[in-house]
Amino acid sequence: MSPALATARILVVDDDPDLLDLIAMRLDSAGYEVAVAASGLEALEIFRATPPRAVVTDLRMDGMDGHALFARLHAEAPSVPVIILTAHGTIPDAVAATQRGVFGFLTKPFDGRELLALVADAVALSPPVAQDRDDAAWRQNIVASSAVMEELLRSARRLAENDAPVLLLGPCGSGKELLAQTLHDTSARSLKPFYVMRCGVAANAKEEEAQLAAALDTARGGTLLLDDIGQLAPALQARLLPLVAEAGLFESKVRVTRIITASSAPLDAEIRAGRFRADLFYSLHRNELILPALTARREDIPLLVAHFATGCIERSAVTACGFSPEALALLCEAAWPGNVRQLRTIVDRALSLAVVPLVPASLVKRLLQDDNELEMIAFDDARRAFEHDYLIKLLKSASGNVAQAARVAQRNRTEFYKLLARHDIDPTPFKQGR
């Protein structure tokens, strides 16, 4: 067993103090760091405070039993392996447990060597994240301590160490580009280029093809992030497929550049509408990371506020040095349609406008109201909304005549039809007499 695995933290849960001590001694003698809990509720508290690499729990316990504890742990961190021990085990119990996602199932009295082997297998499949201090540097630019983000980062840590393509999903402003940069910086390609290409912003398919070729060349040997992948032209999706398809992962030419893709909207609708290739989606979907909205990780807001405030104070000469408790409470309770990106903007604006040492709640409230009135959205979302409204007005003025509308838009008919398909617009209802 490698030293990194031997020093992993294991949480042991049992309401029998003698058995709890025995298991802890066995694991401790094998070199593991052991935390013990005498109940399911105590185990949950320890798990959240210092997340382990694996959990060993008794099945039959007063209050929350092993099955209920597993359900709670699995809901918060599905990648943490759980091993269940029981004196009442049967084959149906074991089958049901493993089908629900339990890593292992041992019947008492169990062989100590079998337990240690099972724990070693569990730890090997559960790489450390921030809770292992010597491995925290890789995610130092990502400010988070919430359970949902720690689970995301646990999965990201695995993907950072290989060349597999990754699909990042999450609302605008949730940090997809930062996570992609972190995956690159943690990989063996970290000294090579990291390049971002925004899909769907080119004037036509030919221009986007040239952009993709240039992006692949610029990112050669490193990582290419294709942002807003759902807007990539269908012809270019076909070109991208061999670079991410499972069949091509072992071809040397495929490994020249790692592909990471991102989308703020689910791709299901694009697939159903025929605008996104299903085979490309399934190739990307194998390694999918979903970033949560800021409202799903509110416990991270105070950390993010402190981080952004420190950066703002270092960059600019500002009067304020922080936020009042009332102002921070408002930030923690806000709706945040623009997610982390919007929070950073509000923090910077508040510190820049404040004329007292602590930003008051009144200023934060006004800035949040201003954002609500402006309906703050990401640039790409604003562009798509404008495009949709423009096409509707154009078809109305041309009475549904696509050729005429295309001439006004200075696009050929093929390109114009693609624009209409991208926005699910049927020109038929706009024709005269309809």
Image (spheres, rainbow, N blue to C red):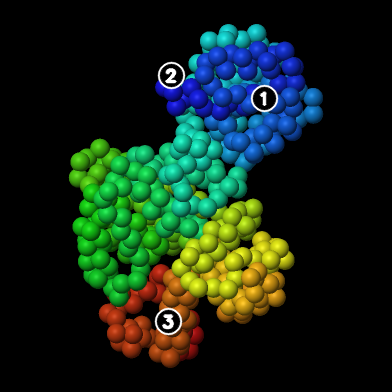
Res. 1 mark:
2
Question: Can you give x and y, in whole percent of width and height, for residue 383 in the image?
Answer: 43, 75
Q: Is residue 100 left or right of residue 194?
A: right
Q: Residues within 10 Å of mark 1 (few under 14, many from 20)?
A: many
Question: Farthest right residue?
Answer: 63
Amino acid type at image mark 3:
Leu
Disc 1 to disc 2: CB gap under 8 Å: no
Q: What element does badge 2 sit on?
A: loop
Question: Can you give x and y, in whole percent of width and height, for residue 298 in the image?
Answer: 64, 56
Closer-to-camera residue (70/340): 340
- The residue that label 3 is drawn on is 391
Q: What element does badge 3 sit on?
A: helix
Q: What element does badge 1 sit on?
A: strand
Closer-to-camera residue (216/309): 309
Q: Earlier in the sequence, mark 3 or mark 1?
A: 1
Label 1 to label 2: alpha-carbon separation:
22 Å
Question: Farthest bottom residue?
Answer: 397
Closer-to-camera residue (327/297): 327
Q: Is residue 190 left or right of residue 314?
A: left
Amino acid type at image mark 2:
Met
